[in-house]
Image (spheres, helix red, strand yellow):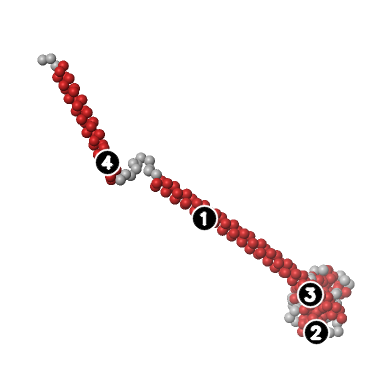
Amino acid sequence: MSLMSAVGVYAQVDRQDVRRGNRDFRKENYREAEIDYRKALVKDSLSVAANYNLANTLYREGDMANAAKALEQIKEVAPSSASASDYYYNVGDVAIAQQNWQGAVDAFRQSLILNPGDMDAKENYIYAKKKLEEQQNQQQNQNNDQNQGNQDQNNDQNQNNDQNNQDQKSDQNQNEDNRNDNQNDDQDRNQDQKNQPQQGQQPKITPQAAQQMLQAIQAKEKETQDKVNKQKAEALKSRQKDKNW
């Protein structure tokens, strides 16, 4: 799954920096080659040769992120060039290094469309497709586990809500029973209070009994008055008797 060698593919004889980079690349002096290609890009940032060969150099240096960026710079023009299949091959190889399986499958598919006889591209395509399927299955299993976990959590929450509702209803019924008992007790006490004379109040009597009581009081007062008058008469009589003039 190594990158297609691009040294000289897009090199132009009138670009000194690119040619110098190609020489350093062949010597596996990748650091110097990177510097040469970047010098060329300072003069022409859209240079296909400089970006393509810089991506190869960065790939060998292990800098996959910047290698992908260099290939991204020429994505509009490289596919229409004579080496388009190699361009897509390198895009797929960088994607594999980044474990971007979908990107790798798409890139190698394009490379095989342009060059069906490229066995390396075919092998890389099969490998990337298998890894993509594994990734998708893993994600599906994770989603299923998460959905199951959410369902279990919802079931537990529903059970807790049902239990809380039952407890709340039970408490409400108990409170209602207590209120009814208290009301019955209050009613019983009120009835007892009605049946018993309140403190400081005379019991109610009938008009007939009141008349009889009044007559008895009047008779008692007359008897008392007669007794007092009699005592007064006796007192006057005595005093008179005692007076000797």
Q: CA distance from mark 3 to mark 4?
A: 116 Å
Q: CA distance from mark 3 to mark 2?
A: 21 Å
Within 10 angstroms of label 4, few (less than 14), some, or many (20 or more) residues?
A: few
Foreground tag (1 vs 2)? 1
Q: CA distance from mark 2 to mark 4?
A: 132 Å
**203 sits to left or right of 187:** left
Residue that carries the numbered disc 1 in the rendered image: 176
Within 10 angstroms of label 2, few (less than 14), some, or many (20 or more) residues?
A: few
Earlier residue among tags 3 and 1 = 3
Residue that carries the numbered disc 4 in the rendered image: 212
Q: Position of residue 43 (x, y in %)?
A: 75, 75
Q: Closest to the observer: 34 or 6?
A: 6
**72 sits to left or right of 183:** right
Q: Closest to the observer: 216 or 56?
A: 216
Q: Amino acid at mark 2?
A: Ile
Q: Secondary structure at mark 2?
A: helix
Q: Position of residue 68 (x, y in %)?
A: 77, 73
The mark found on residue 113 in the picture is: 2
Using the rendered view, name the quadrant where residue 214 is placed. Answer: top left
Residue at 28% x, 45% y: name it: 207
